[in-house]
Image: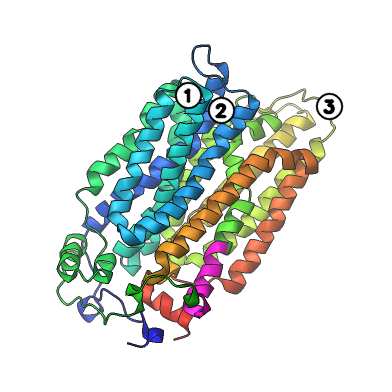
Amino acid sequence: MPEDQVETQPLLRPPGGSVPRGRRVFLAAFAAALGPLSFGFALGYSSPAIPSLQRAAPPAPQLDDEAASWFGAIVTLGAAAGGVLGGWLVDRAGRKLSLLFCTVPFVTGFAVITAAQDVWMLLGGRLLTGLACGIASLVAPVYISEIAYPEVRGLLGSCVQLMVVTGILLAYLAGWVLDWRWLAVLGCVPPSFMLLLMCCMPETPRFLLTQHQRQEAAAAARFLWGSEQGWQEPPVGAEHQGFRLAQLRRPGVYKPFVIGVSLMVFQQLSGINAVMFYAKTIFEEAKLRDSSLASVVVGVIQVLFTAMAAGIMDRAGRRLLLALSGVVMVLSSCAFGAYFKLTQGGPSNASHAVLLAPVSMEPADAGAGLAWLAVGSMCLFIAGFAVGWGPIPWLLMSELFPLHVKGVATGVCVLTNWLMAFLVTKEFGSLMEVLGPHGAFWLASAFCILSVLFTLSCVPETKGKTLEQITAHFEGR
């Protein structure tokens, strides 16, 4: 079979073009999405755990400011390594076994944190949970995109980000009532549950077909979609040969590769990870008394708008939501920068805005009104990100690449994402010192403008298409 004809037809084709109606595909997607739930909890864990660790009395380990910075950021370094490992695992061990494997560093990492006697044990545990985050953030979207049929792939693929933000919110809420040790114990629960559920789920039919396991692929199709009658395997082509550097000359490889990496870069340059990691600090800068409550409100907004995006993803399409999301983020980050500019060098706040308190009818101090500008613009930014730039880069990463380069290409995308997350998270404080808070957010808004232009000029629409039709689009057929 000529190489340029690879993957132009669906690997799994229902008879007469009918849509599969099996419902177990939703159960399998939920089982896989417990990985992103675990990694969301690991990301959110630092926000309530750092204040708890800074207050801890001996013999418990105690974090100073430098150690606290590393405690928040080191998870992204582990995740970058996990992206590389996940890219290797997903092609060799398969999608299901890779998901099962990532539960080990999740549980081990949180167990090490629970038993920590010094700062190094804390950082080691965070590094292990970061490794698991990297594997889960790569394998879960790939698994879900390969088991889903086109009509629900946007919905199920967006549930990856929905579970991430749910995990972050869960960590925030649990942090109100649990100290750092019990919070780490709670972190062991989602990956343990995922291990049990995934043991009962099949490998993806697409991966099984690339391994010439026709019988197992048919059984997986029956489990997921209720029937495999009429589904056929295409001729064996280059998808079984593995990745070779020479393939980067093919438009079906380099085009999605450039798009996937660029989406990950723009996602992080929007400043979202810095906002989530430093949510409390940012709201304290905005002179809100209860910054802990503010963090939870941000988490709730993110969950609600990500759920909304998942519901409309297969109708509105990826491009429209990405562009709309980018525009909202431009406006809100500009407004947040304006808040910091207007309050720069002003008197120490004489009137605090208490979140969720009734707005006074009496003449308010200007600082209080500006604090509400900060609250509004931050919430708008989180909502805008959740509708598009939160879920869609991960969804597109799992859709764009042909099977034979999926492991390597998604590994590079995840590595890029987490390295950028580390740099932004670690250096955000320094950037705010150099440019001022207003300059940092205005810089983020400039990157958001670039992301909108990139979306409109380079990102293809993938809604309603099979994975093989998407590959054919890049090959120019």
Mark 3 residue type: Pro
Q: Which residues are magenta?
A: 248-261
Labelled disc at residue 230: none
Residue 249 shown in magenta: yes
Q: Secondary structure at mark 2?
A: helix
Labelled disc at residue 292: 2
Q: Is residue 78 visible?
A: yes
Q: Is residue 144 visible?
A: no
Find residue 83 and report its horizontal and vertical position in percent: 46, 52
Labelled disc at residue 176: 1
Q: Do the residues bearing badges 2 and 1 touch, measured as CB atoms within 8 Å?
A: yes
Whole-number angstrom distance, CA of label 1 to CA of label 3: 32 Å
Would you place residue 323 above or below residue 282 in this image?
below
- The residue pinned by badge 3 equals 347
Mark 1 residue type: Trp
Q: What residue is rendered at 72% in x and 57% in y?
A: 446
Q: What residue is rendered at 32% in x and 50% in y?
A: 99
Whole-number angstrom distance, CA of label 2 to CA of label 1: 8 Å
- Among the two numbered marks 2 and 1 on one chain, the one whose residue lies closer to the N terminus: 1
